[in-house]
Amino acid sequence: MSFDLSISPGSASPIFKQIVDQVRLALAAGRLSEGDPLPSVRAMAEKLLVNPNTVAKAYTELAGDGTIETQPGRGVFVGRRRQVYTKAERLRRLKPHVDALVTEGLLLGFSLEELIESVTVKAAELRPKKERVP
Amino acid sequence: MMWAYFVKDVKENARWGLLAALLLSGLLAYLLYNGPRTNGSYQPLSLVGDTYLTGTKIGFAVVGLGLGLALVLSDRRRGHWGFAVHRPVPRWKLFAAKVLAGVALYTPAALIAVATAALLASLPRVVKAPFATEMLLPTVYYALAGLMWLSAGMLVGLRQARWIGSRTFPAIGVALVASVVDEWAIHFYEAALADLAVLLVMLAAGAAAFAHNGDDAQQPRPARPFKAMAVGVGVLAILMLLGTIVSSIGLMFMFVRPDLINGNRYILDERGRPYLELRTTESTARFDVKGDRINSADDAWLSVHAAAFIYLSGTDRNEQTPPRSWRRYFESFLRPEAYLEIKSSDDNDARWYYVHAQRTIEGHSGLSGERIGSIGLSGFRGAAEPAEPFPPDVQIDSSYLAGRSLLILTGDRAVLAEFGTRNVRSIFTAPDHARVLSTELVVPAGVRQMSNARSLDDLGQQVWAVAMTPGRFHLVPVSGTTSGETNAEVRAVSVPIDPLPWDASLMISMDRYGQLFALTVAPLNPTLIPTLITLYDGREISRISLPPVPAVATGGHLAELATAVVSPPALALTQARRDSAEYFREVRPPPYLWPAVLLTTLTGVAGVLAIVRRAGLGRVTAVIWSLLTVVFGPAAPLMLLCLSPRPARERCSACGKPRPVDRDACPHCAAGWPTRADPATAVFDDPTRSAA
Amino acid sequence: MSDVVIETHALTRYFGRHCALDGVSLRVPRGSVFALLGRNGSGKSTLIQILLNLLTPTRGTSSVFGEDSRRLSPATLARVGYAPENHPLPASLKVSDVHAFQRSYYRTWDDALFATVLDHFGLSPAQKIGHLSRGQRAGLAMALVMAPRPELLVMDDPSLGLDPVARRTLLEAMLLTTRQRGTTVFFTSHLLDDVERAADHIAILDRSVLRVSCTMETLRSCVKRFALSVAPDAAAPLLVLPGLLQSRREGPTLLLTIANADEDVLRQLRTASAGQLEEVPLTLEDSVVGYLGDTKHQVSLFDRTRPSAEVA
């Protein structure tokens, strides 16, 4: 399994957020799947060269929506996907990304159709892998 | 753990120790070697020579000070302080280790230097002077004094203060103590004890400075007196120097004024009538005992044939023993040698040395450095014979004819050694085995130039010696025992004087035939009555009391006044006393002195109070320093100024007056400091709650 | 045991008339990696030196492990490792000398750790300290403070002047200390990337006054940047908003960095910008510079040096 995080300090996104996002992305892209072990907080911190508290915070956030599960004595694993958020909440969380996509796309001179097209392509890229998962 | 610190400091500063050893050894060797090379201007060289001792003193002081500074300043550099002292050990232990490291670096360097000097001086013909082990004592003493300088260097390095300011004061103070010790200490142990005291004060102040990061403020109470002493002595030293300079300027003015009387004495006419002579820089006025002035045109017949001035300070009048002349003892102990230079009266250009440790007088050729021989009570002995030591009670007085001859006292005898002729003769033996306390040669007025005389006999004039035994003056002819004109026998005279005034001028009057006929004993203390003793044929025929010699008004007041204003009252008074002695003046301080001292003291106290109030110090401090002002004069407020914290001041938000920033409560309105309202931009979360 | 390792209260220090530290009250929780930021001369080193009794405060108090800084017992001092600014070490000694020196003071000395760190920085015991590179000296300094396994590690600008490799190694070493549970790291730095990686708490000293002391997340959620289109003449009321850290104009857009923006502030912003209010992402560096910038209304050096004709 090739799962590698890369952290860039000095970006507008806090480090813990970067971890959360990248784990989620890996999951979405199928590079992580349910039951996969994740490094412990300490191991992750030393691997990324960040403060363990930061990793802990990221893990807490990930565990909060069930993305990962901590099994005492065994470690951290990718959890079973389930929706812990309401539709409204999910929409709220999606909104900034859609905003960014649409704003950036329109600014770059793409038409709405072209934007939808690119979203479709990306989703198609991700979906087949995802569908392999039982 | 102290050991580790010690090892680290020694290793870190080993190169300085090495440098110190090289510098000191080189310096001492140079001082011992340099000198005879220059022809003509002869410089006596030995372990107790002036140049050598001065150089040694300065050398050890500079090296000690430098080493102390090096040890501390390397740690006081930015950042290094943290590495040096952030250790789980009480600070005083670290400081102790540092001091030991300093000692461990300095001692070998000093020992090597002393050993070098000892080796050079003891090797025959390397140093052209006698050698006795005791002669090493001054060198050893100055080497030990280097430790005192080391401690001063450490304190100077540790304290946070301005370099041009109170930071260097401990070193200046040590310089003062060192020079005082040089001047006054008699015995080695006295000098060593004084140095030890300084060392302890410096170390105590240094330990406190070390423990408080060199910060003067907020040191614990027990440390404060040491800090005050260490810094205060420096202030005192500077002011004393200033006082001395000012008073010497004052003295210069004194001599510029021609109308000032600078001396007075009784003189006698041929019939033995006393006249008071008051001398100014330009004229001499004479008065008879009734106080009438004698026309100066008529006084040609008044002449002084011979005079001796005996002055011995600090007399123990009850014991009637010679006063302990500190200076002399110091010279005889720390400098166990006396130089007697004879330049042209000897083919060998011989130098004679009194070697105190051996009680011998030895001669060395100034040309070859070879030992010529020795002089003892029984006379001259050649180089082949061992020197004859003087008896243990020997007392060497350099005579009036310094350098040509030597008066030697032992028990009831006074012996005159003349080096030009290598002759030793007994000049006086006290009756009834009375101890001779002091002798002095009395040379006829006008006979001062002795350069060509090998011996007193060459003068062709009557020379007398005054000898004092308890309760008596003795006058004995030393040379020309018969009068040149009449061939009459010149007789020795012995008169009782009780009590014996040690501080007195002694006037001896002789008739034209060289016969002694009157003695005037005028004590320098104007409250003591001068005595005129008239003699005939060696016997006392009358003794009368004379009016006291009037006090002299000299310009010295100016000097004392100036001294009183800038330096400690005690110094001003000492100065007055010394001037009195020097210029035959009354001992009573001049009239301006006390008001001046009072004014200065009051100003000083006002200064102290102002500083105390400004720095917010306590009442006890105010009282102590006011008292110190009485003792030290203007130095005290300056010391306090150097020692007291001078915090910045800010306007009090409650009462609007300036308040020192280092105190929690405003001294005017007792308000605390306002708590700052956090601006809207502040982001604080209570860390105790958010701790992960 | 208390959860606060370092606590200062209204700590103030003057150097002559200059106030180097002005009423700083700070608490450092146990187990945190606490970064103290500020420009040169803002009082960071002064604060650290006072904490460890290397400097006497003018007024105020500070304590380490609950003990007054000015009377730290040897037992407490043994729990605190301190790496001073610039890694000062006696230049004339060898690595082995300072090793033996330092080791003798700590019962908890870990020789294996020391050797490992030394090796990691490519140091050998026989080397003379005066001949080491800056990075090597930093490594030695780290090894010296880490080997006693201190409970509190205080480091004054450890990364100053280090090359990227040495910096990374230093960061590793710093994080290594947190392996030991409850170990607190208190450090100053100018390298905000490193701070962002290593620190979970942050404090900002601006010209001797403490402006910020909080967790990293609190800072990032409290300081925000907004972009609005406002004509220059209408912007005046916005420039006195409470919490405004920095304002910058980029053409028609006004960029405002604001701390603790509450509803009231947001409303004013919205009103002023006629709804054209946008929150702009903000890096840690931007927020820190917001606090440390000389003026609220930032004009860059470029603008200052631009010929006046061009501005017009």
Image (cartoon, grey):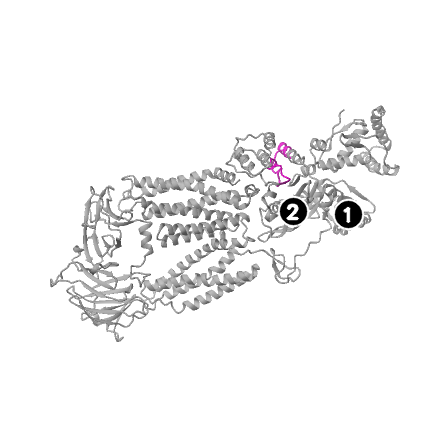
Q: Nearer the viewer, residue B508 or B6?
A: B6
Residue B415 image-quadrant placement: bottom left
Disc 2 is attached to a residue of which chain?
C
Q: How far is disc 2 from disc 1 in space, using C-alphas?
A: 35 Å
**Callout 1 crowding tier (Cα within 10 Å): few <14, some 14–19, many ≥20:** many
Q: Is residue C155 magenta?
A: yes
* Image position, residue B516 (x, y; %): 18, 65
Instruction: Identify the element where label 1 is drawn.
Output: loop
The answer, for residue B577, to whether it is visible in the render is yes
Instruction: Identify the element where label 2 is drawn.
Output: loop
Q: Nearer the viewer, residue B201 or A73?
A: A73
- Above or below: residue C126 compared with residue B578: above
* Image position, residue B34 (x, y; %): 32, 43
Q: Quadrant of the N terminus of chain C?
A: top right
**Furthest-left residue in this view:** B487
**Furthest-right residue in this view:** A87
**Furthest-front residue in this view:** B432
- What residue is drawn where x is 75% and y is 31%? A73
Which one is closest to the eye, mark 2 or mark 1?
Answer: 2
Q: Which residues are magenta?
A: C145-170
- Above or below: residue A54 compared with residue B207: above
**Left or right position of B17 against B265:** right
**Left or right position of B6 against B376:** right
Disc 1 is attached to a residue of which chain?
C
Q: Are marks 2 and 1 on the same chain?
A: yes
Marked residue nearer the N-terminal end (2 or 1): 2
Q: Nearer the viewer, residue C248 or B353?
A: B353
Three-letter code, disc 2: Gly
Three-letter code, disc 1: Ala
Residue, disc 2? C66
Q: Is residue B303 magenta?
A: no
Residue, disc 1? C261
